Amino acid sequence: MDKKWLPLTITLGVAGVAVVAASVWSDDVEEPPLPQSLCHGALSRETAELIDDGQGGGEVSAGAWESEGGTTGSAVLKECHVLRAGQDGAKRRGVYKLVVEETRSAPGAKKDSVPLGPGFTGWALPDRAEVTLPTGCAARMGSAAPHVKASLDVPSQDEERLYRRGEKPPVDPDTATRNNVTVMREVATRLAERYDCADTG
């Protein structure tokens, strides 16, 4: 099987019955050299390493992208788990997750979040972030939805979880937020370039 962006099969569960739809992601885009990038080119290794869970360890790597049925009306297109090797270099642990999905909802913002900056539609918190790709990316990616967004989830910075455990965040919240901003700006830029859908205005 071609290991470029793997053809997506969206699985929709209806009363336990799986229905497979057509491929959404283009399969004719050149795959970047894996040593230099993660998540099939959405992140450089340098940027991917910005997000830390405070446990140290070796270099980052990425788990396989998956396709799943959406539970809220939008299908998950691609999911990438970023891992870090343990101190011994052997056992890997999940550090964060990046999900790229189509959505019919207009971009919004979360309370107390910071914007991603000029030229980007999205927001960031210490434990989460989101960016909406430029208009036109959905069609270029083969989706009929009006928008495609990328979402970031960093469990180690989850305030509620840390509070319940009586723990402090492994990374200062302001630093974590800035790192998330950098990651999401790169994701949006790289995917827009990959699918030739960057805003020109």
Image (tube, rainbow, N blue to C red):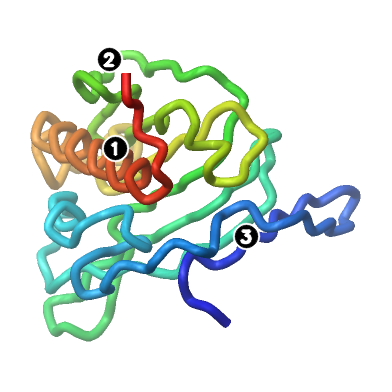
In space, the residues marked 1 and 2 are separated at their CA atoms by: 12 Å
Name above or below for residue 181 compared with residue 40.
Answer: above
The amino acid type found where label 1 is placed reads Asp
Q: Which residue is mark 2?
A: 112
Give SS at disc 1: loop
The mark nearer the N terminus, 1 or 3, is: 3
Name above or below for residue 35 compared with residue 37.
Answer: below
Residue located at (9% from left, 35% from top): 175
Q: Is residue 188 left or right of residue 86?
A: right
Q: Where the N terminus falls, by quadrant? A: bottom right
Residue located at (18% from left, 75% from top): 86
The percent position of residue 148, horizontal first and vertical second, equals 50, 35
Foreground: 14 or 173? 14
Residue located at (46% from left, 26% from top): 135
Q: Is residue 137 left or right of residue 36?
A: right
The percent position of residue 186, horizontal first and vertical second, equals 23, 43
Q: Which residue is mark 1?
A: 127
> Do residues under tags 1 and 3 come within 8 Å of each other at their CB atoms?
no
| Residue 85: quadrant of the picture | bottom left
Q: Which residue is mark 3?
A: 8
The mark nearer the N terminus, 1 or 2, is: 2
